[in-house]
Amino acid sequence: MIIQAEGIEKDFTREGLKDISFRIVPGSFTLITGESGSGKTTLLNIAGGMLHPDRGRVFVDGRDLYRDYTRKERIRLLGSDLGYMMQGVSLIPSLTVKDNITYPLVLTGREYDNEKLEEILNQLGIYEVRDSYPGRISGGEYRRALLAGVLLSEPKILFCDEPTSNLDSDSAAVVTDMLYSYVNPDRSVVVATHDTAFDRADAHVELRRIPVNGIGINAD
């Protein structure tokens, strides 16, 4: 799956994204960096089909994401070929860690491989807390459980918004390594981050804070 973003612009209250173009191809790891307020999350939302740009176009395998897909089709795409680890998403307190991870697939009637689930739990170091409830696990385990839920669905393109935010160094290293290892010839990863530990990338989109009425390009 290939995503091509061309001339993406989005106006915020006082600043905005200006003339952003980039390409996500299978087997690639893309970093989106920039200071707070530069639009990293906004750009992920646009590329993932959740936020319509003010100007510019996003193509998924040659089809315009916001003209050729209906809203329902975009939602379906996000739940299958596109995966998104967002900031601010919470686990369901009344479900165990394991049930939280499998819930999105169960809800949509999709089967999952239990061996694959156990492999992900082990790789992320949360196998021992799989039967615990979210209120009983650490912050690092909580974030890794969120990532596990996205990984289990095996999306072709995985978007992650600040995946190592507020993690200790050990937890951050586990998440970083897991994301790098997720890439294969059929899958790609896009990470929006401040974390300098993500230093291996095939492509780099660097955002700068630019006034809405300013002139310039804020991506490399």
Image (cartoon, helix red, strand yellow):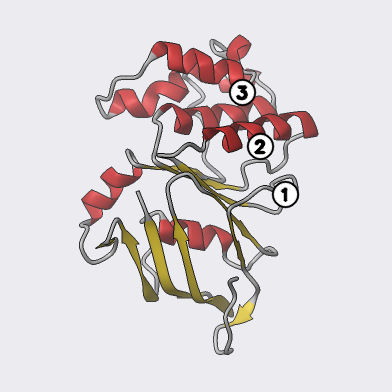
State left or right for residue 111 relative to residue 143.
left
Q: Amino acid at mark 2?
A: Thr
Which residue is at 39% across, 76% downward? 54
Which residue is at 56% across, 26% downward? 145
Q: Is residue 116 visible?
A: yes
* Quarter of the C terminus within the rendering: bottom right
As drawn, the label of residue 124 is 3
Dot 3 alpha-carbon crowd within 10 angstroms: few under 14, some 14 to 19, many 20 or more:
many
**Mark 2 and mark 3: Cα distance apart in space:** 10 Å
Q: Amino acid at mark 3?
A: Leu
Query: Where residue 43 sits in the image (x, y, percent)?
Result: 50, 62
Q: Residue beneath label 2, please?
A: 176
Which residue is at 55% across, 76% downward? 16
Which residue is at 75% across, 50% downward? 196
| Callout 1: SS | loop
Q: Quadrant of residue 164?
A: top right
State left or right for residue 132 relative to residue 108.
right
Dot 2 alpha-carbon crowd within 10 angstroms: few under 14, some 14 to 19, many 20 or more:
some
**Mark 3 and mark 1: Cα distance apart in space:** 19 Å
Q: Nearer the viewer, residue 205 or 145?
A: 205
For marks 1 and 2 on the same chain, the one whose residue lies earlier in the sequence: 2
